[in-house]
Image: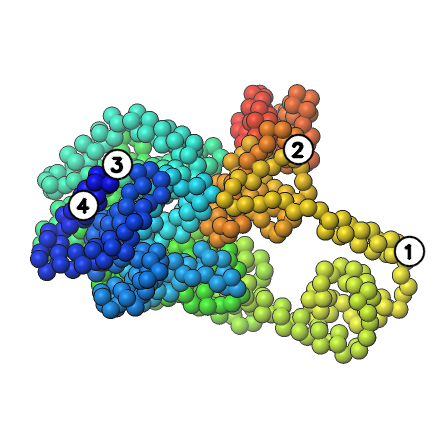
């Protein structure tokens, strides 16, 4: 574009913003928006966006303002803040005080808190975590900060093509892990789905294209069935609701891909791949709940429904404001999820309560934010624990106390989670629970509308196994802190006992005590003493005995190894460039959580100067590291001349028969010439499941062995372990 064409394009974008709402064209409102636009355009004068047509930077603030107005439903204050949101960050001469004097305290507060923080090197958390933590703190004062931040991120994702790959990995990880769940919390369904799809497209382009192609093809092949089902529903509903609208709502491609990562899942297995939404026109002075249940009655009189699948989200809407009657009906000999809701409910289901800021359901957001900020004030939380807290749960159930009080929990919550939700002391003293009058253990997973009674006692001692029972991270953190505080008391007691001996020994003798007691550090030693696992008499015996020649040689060898490691040259690492892996190196490890092999799309995390960990890019830990440690992560590039081996795991299932395992082992050892490190086979009647640990050279090597095993008679399923 020429400079004149670019200027015309900017004018067009601004006119489209003004056309979002008729009220923006009123003279008094137009003057308010014009003032902010003129200020921002002058502040960003001479600055262009990166890549593409090098458009003037002002197109980004205009786009953000259009999102908050058109897609979220906000008015003048948010439009002003959106137009001005980057002025303080990008323009040295403009401060928050400048904005406050010109546009007032509300606009200046929003601009200040959507601006990136000035990060200090001594801060407790990585930059991305700290930024989001401060965003939540700002939300305790004004929820609109979150909407503005989401609009900013959405436009950045829409215009991300020319960004460097390393930065794309960081931004998309943040978007999937934090901004998409935040959009869900705020009820912004469309925006959440777009954030997920765009992040998925940039992060895993080949997987995105494959998922989109296969899903679109599947939906197209289902068109005749879909049209038949829609017409059937419309014909039935139109008897009492002549102006009914029926919409088809589809899962995001990212969510579909995530479901398909589970072993043996297909598109046909996802019963709620898409949902039919029956939207009732909303006359005045009519009871919405009665309208929806009248239609529910009409449908279930004609089609079978799943009894436990009914969800009444009208009497008690979800935390993000979603309100509807949801159930599964058998249409055309298959189960389909149906949602019945009014026009207003449908608007909320798509765009949340952004345009209804004082609605009572917005206070659910305030409760979550308040609880989360309180948790963040606890110093013991790690970056990973902070990230877990920042992700709102997407799926919700409602359970009841004996008094009929409604308790909202994430789907997957256990009876023990319910106890902690009521009060930490009740959770720590958990004995058992009664669900619908039946005694159940701590790990019982609650279902919608369950009635729960907790049996608790102060005499009960919490069990560390409960960490595997609890579903909610917040509750796990509370239990971890309990054990940590208890351990600190034991350690302190042990230290006092040790100091009372007045041993006055040198470091070499102290290290000998650590070695002989199996302790890596003094804290472990003090814990053993404090918990009576180690007596003071045993310590004194260790000191009095002589050192063996074996101990002396071991110590010398240890020193030589340390000296050798210190002399190793540092591996070159640049977060802005791909990390090339040429050969096996003890300093470059593969992550046990996802077990990447040569050829996998991967990232590397720099632990320290001589320690690096490689993760598959679709690994949840990889996303977490991208989102929290951007200066320590980058993409991996595998050298074509790399000949190392990688430990991986394949799982298989089938019908048991003589020599079946022998046939599988023959393929791995003889045909593929690969080494197995572990083989586990379990037989259940005539069925078996197996897990094989083996060493492969690259991802093609792994695919070949899986394909060969699939052809073995009586093998039903073979897949790479997730």
Give the labeled residue for mark 4. 11
Residue 398: % across, % down: 35, 56
Mark 2 near mark 1, Cβ–Cβ under 8 Å? Answer: no
Q: Distance from label 4 to label 1 (Cα)?
A: 85 Å
Are discs 1 and 3 less than 8 Å apart at CB?
Answer: no
| N-terminal label among 2 and 4 | 4
Front residue of 138/340: it is 138
Q: Quadrant of residue 514?
A: bottom right
Check residue 644 in the rendering and tell me which mark sits there, or answer none.
2
Of pointers 2 and 1, the one earlier in the residue sequence? 1
Q: Nearer the viewer, residue 599 or 353?
A: 599
In depth, the one of 67 and 224 nearer the eye is 67
Q: Residue 294 in the image: x percent, y percent?
A: 17, 47
Q: CA distance from mark 1 to mark 3?
A: 80 Å
Lower sequence index among marks 1 and 3: 3
Quarter of the image with the N terminus in it = top left
Comparing labels 2 and 1, the label whose residue is closer to the camera? 2
Secondary structure under tag 4 reads helix
State the image quarter where residue 369 is shown.
Answer: bottom left
- For image coordinates 58% across by 37% down, the residue present is 580
> Along the polypeptide, which appears first: circle 4 or circle 3?
3
- Front position among marks 3 and 2: 3
The earlier-in-sequence mark between 3 and 2 is 3
In the picture of the structure, the residue carrying the numbered disc 1 is 549
Q: Circle 3 sits on which residue? A: 1
Cα–Cα gap, marks 2 and 1: 38 Å
Residue 575: x %, y % from top left: 52, 46
| Side of 486 relative to 190 (left or right) | right
Query: From the viewer's perspective, is 157 left or right of 504?
Result: left
Residue in view at x 32 percent, y 64 percent: 95
């Amino acid at each position: 574009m020429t400079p004149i064409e670019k200027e015309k394009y900017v004018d067009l974008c601004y006119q489209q913003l003004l056309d979002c709402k008729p009220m923006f064209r009123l003279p008094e409102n137009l003057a308010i928006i014009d003032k902010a636009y003129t200020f921002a355009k002058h502040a960003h004068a001479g600055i262009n966006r990166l890549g593409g047509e090098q458009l003037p930077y002002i197109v980004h603030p205009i786009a953000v303002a259009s999102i908050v107005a058109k897609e979220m439903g906000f008015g003048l204050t948010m439009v002003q803040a959106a137009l001005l949101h980057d002025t303080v960050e990008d323009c040295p001469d403009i401060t928050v005080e400048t904005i406050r004097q010109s546009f007032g305290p509300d606009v200046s507060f929003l601009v200040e808190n959507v601006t990136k923080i000035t990060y200090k090197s001594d801060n407790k958390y990585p930059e991305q975590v700290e930024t989001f933590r401060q965003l939540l703190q700002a939300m305790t004062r004004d929820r609109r900060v979150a909407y503005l931040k989401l609009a900013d991120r959405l436009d950045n994702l829409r215009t991300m093509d020319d960004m460097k790959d390393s930065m794309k990995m960081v931004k998309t990880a943040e978007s999937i892990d934090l901004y998409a769940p935040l959009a869900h919390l705020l009820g912004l369904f469309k925006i959440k789905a777009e954030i997920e799809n765009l992040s998925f497209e940039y992060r895993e382009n080949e997987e995105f294209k494959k998922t989109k192609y296969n899903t679109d093809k599947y939906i197209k092949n289902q068109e005749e069935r879909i049209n038949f089902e829609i017409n059937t529903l419309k014909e039935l509903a139109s008897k009492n609701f002549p102006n009914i609208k029926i919409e088809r709502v589809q899962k995001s491609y990212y969510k579909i891909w995530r479901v398909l990562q589970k072993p043996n899942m297909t598109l046909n297995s996802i019963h709620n791949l898409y949902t039919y939404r029956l939207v009732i026109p909303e006359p005045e002075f009519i009871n919405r709940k009665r309208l929806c249940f009248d239609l529910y009655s009409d449908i279930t009189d004609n089609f079978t429904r799943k009894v436990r699948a009914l969800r009444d989200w009208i009497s008690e809407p979800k935390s993000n404001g979603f309100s509807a009657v949801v159930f599964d009906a058998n249409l055309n000999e298959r189960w389909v999820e149906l949602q019945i809701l009014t026009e207003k409910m449908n608007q909320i289901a798509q765009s949340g309560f952004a345009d209804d800021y004082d609605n009572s359901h917005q206070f659910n957001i305030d409760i979550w934010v308040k609880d989360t900020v309180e948790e963040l004030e606890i110093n013991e939380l790690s970056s990973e624990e902070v990230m877990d807290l920042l992700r709102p749960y997407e799926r919700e159930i409602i359970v009841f106390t004996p008094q009929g009080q409604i308790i909202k929990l994430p789907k997957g919550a256990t009876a023990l989670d319910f106890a902690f939700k009521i009060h930490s002391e009740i959770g720590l003293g958990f004995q058992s629970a009664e669900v619908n009058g039946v005694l159940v253990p701590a790990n019982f997973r609650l279902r919608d509308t369950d009635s729960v009674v907790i049996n608790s006692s102060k005499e009960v001692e919490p069990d560390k196994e409960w960490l595997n029972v609890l579903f909610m991270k917040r509750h796990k953190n509370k239990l971890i802190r309990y054990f940590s505080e208890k351990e600190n008391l034991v350690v302190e007691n042990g230290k006092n006992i040790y100091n009372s001996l007045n041993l006055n020994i040198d470091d070499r003798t102290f290290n000998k005590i650590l070695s002989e007691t199996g302790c890596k550090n003094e804290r472990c030693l003090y814990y053993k003493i404090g918990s009576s696992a180690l007596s003071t008499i045993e310590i004194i015996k260790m000191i009095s005995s002589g050192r063996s020649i074996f101990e002396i040689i071991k110590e010398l060898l240890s020193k030589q190894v340390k000296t050798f490691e210190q002399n190793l040259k540092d591996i070159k690492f640049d977060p802005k460039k791909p990390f090339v892996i040429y050969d096996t190196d003890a300093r470059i490890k593969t992550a046990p959580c996802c077990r990447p092999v040569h050829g996998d799309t991967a990232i590397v995390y720099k632990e320290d100067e001589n320690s690096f960990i490689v993760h598959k890019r679709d690994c949840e830990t990889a996303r977490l590291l991208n989102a929290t440690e951007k200066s320590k992560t980058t993409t991996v590039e595998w050298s074509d001349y790399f000949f190392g081996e990688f430990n991986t795991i394949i799982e298989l299932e089938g019908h048991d028969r003589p020599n079946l395992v022998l046939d599988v082992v023959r393929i791995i050892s003889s045909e593929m010439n690969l080494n197995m490190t572990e083989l586990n086979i379990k037989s259940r009647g005539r069925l078996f499941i197996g897990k094989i640990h083996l060493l492969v050279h690259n991802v093609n090597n792994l695919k070949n062995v899986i394909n060969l095993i699939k052809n073995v008679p009586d093998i039903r399923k073979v897949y790479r372990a997730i």
